Image (spheres, helix red, strand yellow):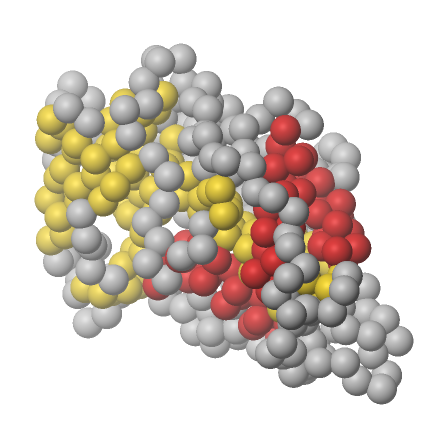
Amino acid sequence: MRIRPAVLFLTLASCAGAPATPAGTVAPPAAPPSVRAAGPSAPDVAPVATAPVAPAAEASGAPAGKLTLDQARRYMLELVNRDRKSQGLGPVALEPGPATVAAQRHADDMLRLGFLGHWGSDGSIPEQRHTEAGGVDMVLENALCMTDEVRRTLDGHLLLERAEIERAERMFFDEVPPNDGHRKNILRPQHTHVGIGIALPVRTPTEIPVPCFVQEFTDHYATYEPLSKTATPRQMVHLAATLDPRMTPGGFGIARVDLPKPLPPTELNRRRSYPVPAPYQNFWPQGFKTPVAVQVTGTTMRVDVPLGDEPGLYEISTWAKPASGTGEYRMIGLRTVRVER
């Protein structure tokens, strides 16, 4: 018996549909009206140029025609950049650190329990997993896995056929409007990097193993001063970012969601969408309507602000726009802080 995987993509608002029928994407949370920006749109800033990745080699001890996990990731990167090039976009680089760590964590989790979604079995959400892995940048997720809620054992020595990786990328990229959220994510011009997670179950007498895939696309446009991953209600936090010269400083935002709690596979499969929460408060430089002014020196912006009164998972977003002046403010960074009493 062969299990057919389903696919799901992360949007910045909502998507819905049956397991094998992803819906369309919508725009990110808008900046407040006082900023006179309706929210991110397609930017005119090109991603960082990276050297092309050569096809995965076969010299690592893997059987002929099979790819190890590292080779499979690089081959999927090659396919992603092929698809971006087909639409006139520059390549993204493989990000072996936080984005891949977060992607692999989620791919393993989905495969073990047979679910598909952006919440993890521990109740985690994409930006939380990315933050916990050390990530600081904006992250958007594509996911593909089974939805049968069958427990499986991970194959610790993954070997994949190229055709399996090609099939997964086709499922993401060959979508047609209006159900083309994965394709749009792959083709977002502002993406600069991608993390890739791939999980494969152990073969059984009744099942041909089918892999699960997670792509975590990230936007590297700033460096950040450290931010604690835990805090208490009303604690003051210091936010500081130095932007890439291609970007103009904007501000910071704070959103809040409930603290994560474990979820069963049935509930995970039921949650067919994940909205990145819009900030309940934004902080901008002088000249904008803002409760606390962000200090801007060159391309560095900083501010000290309080977290909210209630426990929860607080999301700290960083906003900027292209230095060319033709784009709008958009999220370029998204970090989480766990707040408990």
Q: Left or right: 219 with respect to 32? A: right
* Residue 225 in picture, x, y percent from top left: 18, 47
The residue located at (50%, 48%) in the rendering is 94
- Tell me if residue 269 comes above or below residue 175 in the rendering: below
Residue 307 rendering spot, x and y as whole percentages? 19, 53
Q: Is residue 258 left or right of residue 91?
A: left
Res 124 quadrant in image: bottom left
Question: Is residue 78 positioned above or below 319 on the image?
Answer: below
* Camera-side residue of 327 and 259: 327
> Closer to the camera, 57 or 160?
57
Q: Nearer the viewer, residue 334 or 224?
A: 224
Q: In this view, does 86 lie above or below 125?
A: above
Query: Is residue 147 something one can see in this rendering?
Result: no
- Residue nearest the viewer, comparing 323 with 75: 75
Pick the quarter of the image with the C terminus. bottom left
Residue farthest to the right, as pictured: 1
Is 51 on the left-hand or right-hand side of 199? left
Name the quarter where the N terminus is drawn: bottom right
Please state the horizontal and vertical placement of residue 92, each as a whole percent of the image.
51, 38
Total numbered badges shown on the rendered structure = 0
Q: Residue at x 61, y 44 (%)?
A: 54
* Residue drawn at (47%, 74%) of the image: 122
Specify whether residue 308 is in view.
yes
Q: Position of residue 73 (x, y in %)?
A: 59, 55
Q: In this view, does 197 lie to the left or right of 35?
A: right
